């Protein structure tokens, strides 16, 4: 059977009348009435190493693992972009979670190809076919970096914390970053094209290279641009702060911003996204059209203690009097129907792998609506700290596909 074109899926997203409590996205397409379900899964081993210098010399031991590692660790994916040939641009974050322990982690965007496990079988593996190294040979950064005095000036996790990614029409990358927080613009080869764009109003995190002595940070640590969505025409970006601001009494409140790419400036439009629980985080976002976004909301817990790993839909035209966005539940990632038993043979005994599939990782940080209408989800595994599937064993990187019930057939 042929897949429903994405414009058909977007139409279903647009007219869905479902209440927030509903786990479905829209009425099922003709000939497809099984509702949302897991249709594919692939994993990359937690201890996978890519070519490059030793990494993790300063990482804290966890789950029986300690550094250094003889190559470059791949600590999951914080963002992904569909390429169109079955592969994805997939980007890890800054490595090991802090400036102080990530100076030997090189910032890269990998070309990842899943060999999906589906109802028909399959390897269930992920290959990393190539990578783009983020770098600053043009010297657009006006603060010192680890590889300051080299020609290529490869960027590391002590320089920037890259978290979100969109692909521009010209093949360049826009990247959401947390240390500033900044918006970064890199060419197709990963070289920065222009100076980082800071938040307006001088808002800075504790890790900002521009934080002055005695200055109080106005963004919490690691709560920068975890999410970044681009309008279909690429003219507007929507960076979203990961969590509430310092001193904010309402700890449900997260800010959604608007950036005009042509003007290289933030607009004065802002929205409030309200999380389910105080302190919940926004892990990623994806633009369905000029007005509607998918927003991935998560708590900061993994394994059996996880409560919130959900994808919501919002419409920037629909807010209450205070500018708070209305939201509609698309899928609860802790309770995904798995009628085909995907993952059961590969991971017998793993937490959350069963007839109901759970994605209970701490940092669920990738959501992409694919061209065929399925939803791609992936995790940052915070290697080696997280052990959601098997206690005491570091989590693998996982990519899954969810059929939302808005498409006809299709194959992984």
Image: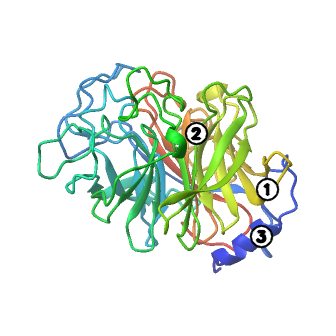
At 23% across and 39% down in the image, what residue appears? Answer: 145
Image location of residue 91, percent across then percent down: 40, 50
Helix, strand or loop at disc 1? loop
In the rendering, which numbered label is found on residue 24?
1
**Comparing labels 2 and 1, the label whose residue is closer to the camera:** 2
Few, some or many residues within 10 Å of mark 3 (<14, 14–19, 20+): some
Image location of residue 207, percent across then percent down: 40, 30
At 51% across and 23% down in the image, what residue appears? Answer: 391
Above/below status of 46 relative to 84: above
In the rendering, which numbered label is found on residue 368?
none
**Comparing labels 1 and 3, the label whose residue is closer to the camera:** 3
Give the colour scheme of this rendering: rainbow
Task: Find the distance from the CA under tag 1 to the CA under tag 3.
Answer: 11 Å
At 79% across and 56% down in the image, what residue appears? Answer: 24
**191 horizontally vs 283: left or right:** left
In the rendering, which numbered label is found on residue 242?
2
Above/below status of 310 relative to 210: below
Q: Earlier in the sequence, mark 1 or mark 3?
A: 3
Few, some or many residues within 10 Å of mark 2 (<14, 14–19, 20+): many
Q: Earlier in the sequence, mark 2 or mark 3?
A: 3
The residue lying toward the viewer, choosing from 353 and 79, is 79
At 48% across and 35% down in the image, what residue appears? Answer: 204
The residue lying toward the viewer, choosing from 242 and 113, is 242
- Residue 2 occupies quadrant: bottom right
Few, some or many residues within 10 Å of mark 1 (<14, 14–19, 20+): many
In the rendered structure, are the residues bearing label 2 and label 3 in contact, judged by CB atoms less than 8 Å apart? Answer: no
Image location of residue 47, percent across then percent down: 33, 36
The residue tagged 3 is: 12
Helix, strand or loop at disc 2? loop
Q: Earlier in the sequence, mark 2 or mark 1?
A: 1
The residue lying toward the viewer, choosing from 369 and 223, is 223
Task: Find the distance from the CA under tag 2 to the CA under tag 1.
Answer: 25 Å
């Amino acid at each position: 059977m042929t897949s429903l074109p994405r414009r058909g899926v977007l139409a279903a997203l647009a007219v869905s009348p479902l209440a927030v409590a509903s786990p479905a996205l829209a009425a099922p397409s003709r000939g497809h009435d099984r509702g949302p379900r897991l249709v594919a899964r692939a994993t990359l081993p937690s201890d996978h190493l890519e070519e490059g210098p030793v990494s993790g010399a300063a990482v804290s031991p966890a789950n029986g693992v300690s550094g250094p590692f003889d190559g470059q660790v791949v600590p999951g994916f914080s963002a992904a972009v569909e390429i169109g040939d079955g592969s994805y641009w997939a980007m890890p974050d800054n490595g090991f979670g802090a400036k102080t322990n990530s100076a030997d982690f090189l910032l890269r965007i990998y070309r990842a190809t899943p060999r999906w496990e589906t109802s028909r079988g399959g390897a269930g593996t992920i290959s990393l076919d190539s990578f783009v190294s983020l770098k600053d040979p043009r010297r657009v950064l006006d603060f010192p970096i680890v590889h300051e005095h080299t020609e290529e000036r490869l960027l590391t996790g002590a320089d920037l914390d890259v978290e979100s990614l969109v692909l521009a029409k010209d093949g360049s990358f826009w990247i959401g970053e947390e240390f500033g927080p900044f918006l970064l613009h890199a060419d197709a080869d990963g070289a920065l094209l222009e100076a980082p764009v800071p938040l307006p109003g001088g808002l800075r995190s504790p890790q900002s290279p521009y934080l002055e002595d005695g200055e109080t940070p106005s963004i919490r640590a690691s709560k920068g641009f975890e999410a970044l969505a681009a309008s279909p025409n690429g003219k507007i970006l929507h960076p979203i702060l990961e969590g509430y601001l310092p001193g904010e009494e309402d700890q449900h409140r997260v800010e959604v911003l608007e950036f005009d790419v042509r003007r290289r400036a933030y607009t004065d439009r802002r929205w409030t996204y309200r999380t389910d629980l105080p302190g919940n985080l926004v892990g990623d976002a994806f633009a369905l059209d000029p007005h509607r976004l998918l927003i991935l909301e998560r708590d900061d817990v993994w394994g059996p203690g996880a409560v919130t790993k959900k994808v919501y839909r919002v419409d920037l035209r629909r807010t209450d009097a205070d500018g708070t966005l209305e939201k509609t539940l698309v899928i609860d990632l802790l309770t995904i129907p798995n009628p085909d038993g995907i993952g059961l043979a590969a991971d017998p005994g793993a937490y959350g792998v069963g007839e109901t599939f759970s994605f209970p990782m701490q940092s669920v940080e990738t959501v992409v609506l694919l061209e065929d209408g399925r939803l791609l989800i992936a995790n940052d595994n915070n290697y080696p700290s997280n052990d959601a599937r098997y206690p005491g064993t570091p989590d693998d990187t996982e990519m899954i596909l969810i059929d939302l019930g808005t498409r006809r057939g299709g194959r992984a």
